[in-house]
Image (cartoon, rainbow, N blue to C red):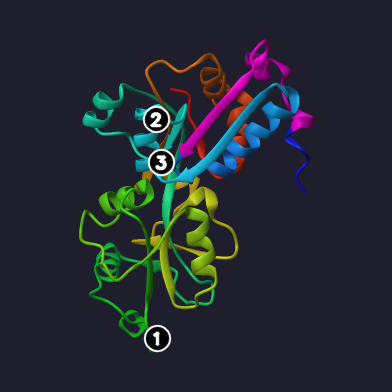
Amino acid sequence: MFLSFLTFLNASDLKVFENLEGSLNIAGGTAHIKCEKEAIKNIMSKYPNISISIAGGGSGMGIKQVSSKIIDLANSGRKPTLEEIKNGNLKLFRFAIDGIGVIINPKINIDTLTTKQLQDIFSGKITNFKELGLADAPINLYTRDESSATRKVFWDKALAKSPISNKARVVSSNAAMKTAVSSDINAIGIISLGVVNDSVKLINIDGIAPSVENINNNTYKVARGLYLLSSGEPSKLASAFITYLRSSEGAKIVSKYGFIPVNE
């Protein structure tokens, strides 16, 4: 049973919001959302003159919107390209490291897949579970849209940039991926480790478990930074939000949701 984080808040960590008011709009990558929602709840409970909204849409959309100053901060699950940084005058603030895992429905009796098997599954070469030594059943492949950093990092680091089948079913967020895979007994998909719960089953890659320990010791390599991005220097309110996420209490929230906190 989790007690409210407000019970344990260090007053000095929230103190960065003293004498601040106004609104802060955040959008983009969906891996960040649950973690940041808890931080936002803490902030707005103590400082009712501050309003912070958060939305998804994917990292690519977030980068475009912050570059156009439609939003104040973008969530991104990848480092922006040099062109994106230049065009949007982007400032990068990494606050966590997240792994990306392969998930299946818990009723499927698979514990590990090789890199080659994953490449063949996601390219559409392997389309049936009997090709993996299981009963005859079609594989229903799920992926994210091309603006998703979860998809891009998985494609780069797990698939070594081998193709992803255009027959894969596309979902809009990590939460939607979890729902889709948990409700489809023949599903295989990809997800942020910070979103995983018992409704889906994580698969080892080449025998290596997608765990915080293995990300830390660099044996599980399908990982990425979670960033907050501003166009130009962040506003005082945006800067305070970044500082809070990187504080000791922010690190507790980050860790609670399965991420590795960083402060750089």
Quarter of the view holding residue 203: bottom left
Question: Residue 31, percent across and down?
Answer: 48, 45
Crowd tier of the residue under label 2, counting other residues whose Cα lies within 10 Å: few below 14, some 14–19, many 20 or above: many
**Segment colored magenta:** 6-27
- Determine which residue is flagged by label 2: 66
Identify which amino acid the numbered label 3 is placed on. Answer: Asn
Q: Is residue 82 left or right of residue 147?
A: left
Question: Residue 112, percent across and down?
Answer: 40, 67
Instruction: Look at discs 3 and 1 and give the one toward the viewer.
Output: 1
Identify which amino acid the numbered label 2 is placed on. Answer: Val
In the depicted structure, whether residue 168 falls above or below residue 263: below
Instruction: Look at discs 3 and 2 and give the one toward the viewer.
Output: 2
Q: Earlier in the sequence, mark 3 or mark 2?
A: 2
Quarter of the view holding residue 119: bottom left
Residue at 67% over, 26% down: 43
- Determine which residue is flagged by label 1: 137
- Determine which residue is flagged by label 3: 217
Q: Earlier in the sequence, mark 2 or mark 1?
A: 2
